[in-house]
Image: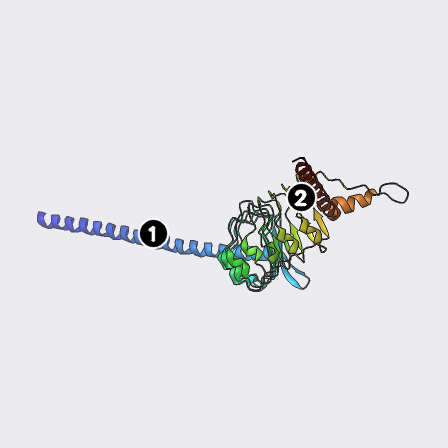
């Protein structure tokens, strides 16, 4: 009887523990399933939030669209956009970007998807790199990246076969260009001012259609001897450099009508420049020229100086000054030769 009772007690205890163990396992399984459901729900929630955020950003970008001169333009100014969102791809029909003073740090690699882009103006931002994908924009006509932090120009830019205008002013550390840029057959306007170039890149000299070049505010120490190969160039800005002399071949630049050379280290003006009848505007101001030459004052019929004429012709254009300087230098050179000739004659007679 005692054995039966003991056996019954053991069976009851065993059944009780089995019930408890099964209940704990069921609770753990239920908890695990709840956790999984919660995770799935959280992911879905986050996905939903991301979708709604993209929609909100896209709606905000759509408000920046304008139609100007028949072009669809994306214009963003003085707002913080350090990066451009991927949802921008839904506006791939945009033909012109005007994004200024936004703190933009990077041109997105998906820029290559904007095949309709004609103008990319990202001036006055913080862009430090031009992506290689830029070369896919074969219809791009203008790339404006002045006042950024660009230090390197990729050779792929030479694939932008329609490029007519390239502005890279005030990037400070920029000091070279890839030689492949000579393949930009349509490039007419190039602004490299206020950078760190010490010479004019060979690829610039070889640009076949270049008409306007600004390399003022660099560290140019000399100009290329074959500068006359820039046959189509009509405007050349070289102010605030370190130039000490001009190559004689500059006089062979038949299309050049504007030449700015103020604030350099020029000691003389090449005599051959006197024949540059095409040169309309030239400025040699603030150079340590060897001869101290002053133009004779002009006077009107009443005898008074025409101050406005003085300001326009002599300070701004400087062509009259250039010719007068060359003539004066020639006169003084002849005078020195004559003195030497007289001295030689005297020496010959005395001997």
Residue 11 percent coordinates (x, y): 16, 51
Q: Nearest the camera: 328 or 213?
A: 328
The kind of secondary structure element at disc 1 is helix
Question: Is residue 70 visible to us here?
Answer: yes
Q: Residues within 10 Å of mark 1 (few under 14, many from 20)?
A: few
> Is 75 on the left or on the right of 38, as rendered?
right
Question: Quick one: label 1 or label 2, which is nearer the N terminus?
Answer: 1
Assess whether mark 2 and mark 1 are in contact (beta carbons under 8 angstroms): no
Taking the view exactly as shown, the residue that stands out farthest to the right is 302
**Residue shown at 64%/45% (left/top)?**
239
The kind of secondary structure element at disc 2 is loop
Q: CA distance from mark 1 to mark 2?
A: 81 Å
Mark number, residue 270: none
Q: Which quadrant holds the C terminus? A: top right
Tell me if residue 335 comes above or below residue 29 in the rendering: above
Residue 311 percent coordinates (x, y): 78, 43
Question: Is residue 109 visible to us here?
Answer: no
Residue 186 percent coordinates (x, y): 60, 62
For disc 2, the marked residue is: 262
Residue 293 percent coordinates (x, y): 73, 40
Tell me if residue 239 comes above or below residue 279 in the rendering: above
Q: Nearer the viewer, mark 1 or mark 2?
A: 2
Q: Nearest the camera: 143 or 272?
A: 272
Q: Could you say which quadrant of the image residue 115 lies in?
A: bottom right
Q: Nearest the camera: 145 or 208?
A: 208
Q: Nearest the camera: 165 or 33?
A: 165
Q: Could you say which quadrant of the image residue 303 lies in?
A: top right
For disc 1, the marked residue is: 31
């Amino acid at each position: 009887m005692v054995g039966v009772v003991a056996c019954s007690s053991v069976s009851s205890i065993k059944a009780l523990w089995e019930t408890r163990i099964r209940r704990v396992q069921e609770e753990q399984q239920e908890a695990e399933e709840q956790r999984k459901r919660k995770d799935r729900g959280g992911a879905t929630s986050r996905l939903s939030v991301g979708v709604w955020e993209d929609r909100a950003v896209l709606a905000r970008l759509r408000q920046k669209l304008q139609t100007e001169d028949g072009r669809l333009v994306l214009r963003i100014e003085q707002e913080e956009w350090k990066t451009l969102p991927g949802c921008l791809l839904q506006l791939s029909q945009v033909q012109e970007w005007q994004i200024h003073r936004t703190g933009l740090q990077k041109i997105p690699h998906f820029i290559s998807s904007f095949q309709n882009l004609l103008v990319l103006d990202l001036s006055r931002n913080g862009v430090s790199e031009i992506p290689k994908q830029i070369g896919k924009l074969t219809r791009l006509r203008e790339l404006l990246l002045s006042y950024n932090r660009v230090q390197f120009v990729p050779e792929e830019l030479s694939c932008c076969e329609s490029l007519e205008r390239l502005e890279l002013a005030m990037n400070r550390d920029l000091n070279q260009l890839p030689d492949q840029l000579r393949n930009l057959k349509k490039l007419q306007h190039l602004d490299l001012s206020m950078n760190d170039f010490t010479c004019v890149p060979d690829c610039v000299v070889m640009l076949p259609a270049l008409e306007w070049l600004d390399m003022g505010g660099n560290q140019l120490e000399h100009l290329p001897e074959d500068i006359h190969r820039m046959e189509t160039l009509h405007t050349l800005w070289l102010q605030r450099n370190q130039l000490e002399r001009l190559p004689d071949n500059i006089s062979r630049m038949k299309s050049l009508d504007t030449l700015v050379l103020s604030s350099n280290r020029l000691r003389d003006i090449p005599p051959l420049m006197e024949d540059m009848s095409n040169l309309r505007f030239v400025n040699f101001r603030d150079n340590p020229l060897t001869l101290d030459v002053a133009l004779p004052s002009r006077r009107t019929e009443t005898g008074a100086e025409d101050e406005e004429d003085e300001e326009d012709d002599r300070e701004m254009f400087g062509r009259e000054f250039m010719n007068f300087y060359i003539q004066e230098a020639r006169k003084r050179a002849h005078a020195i030769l004559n003195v030497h000739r007289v001295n030689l004659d005297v020496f010959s007679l005395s001997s």
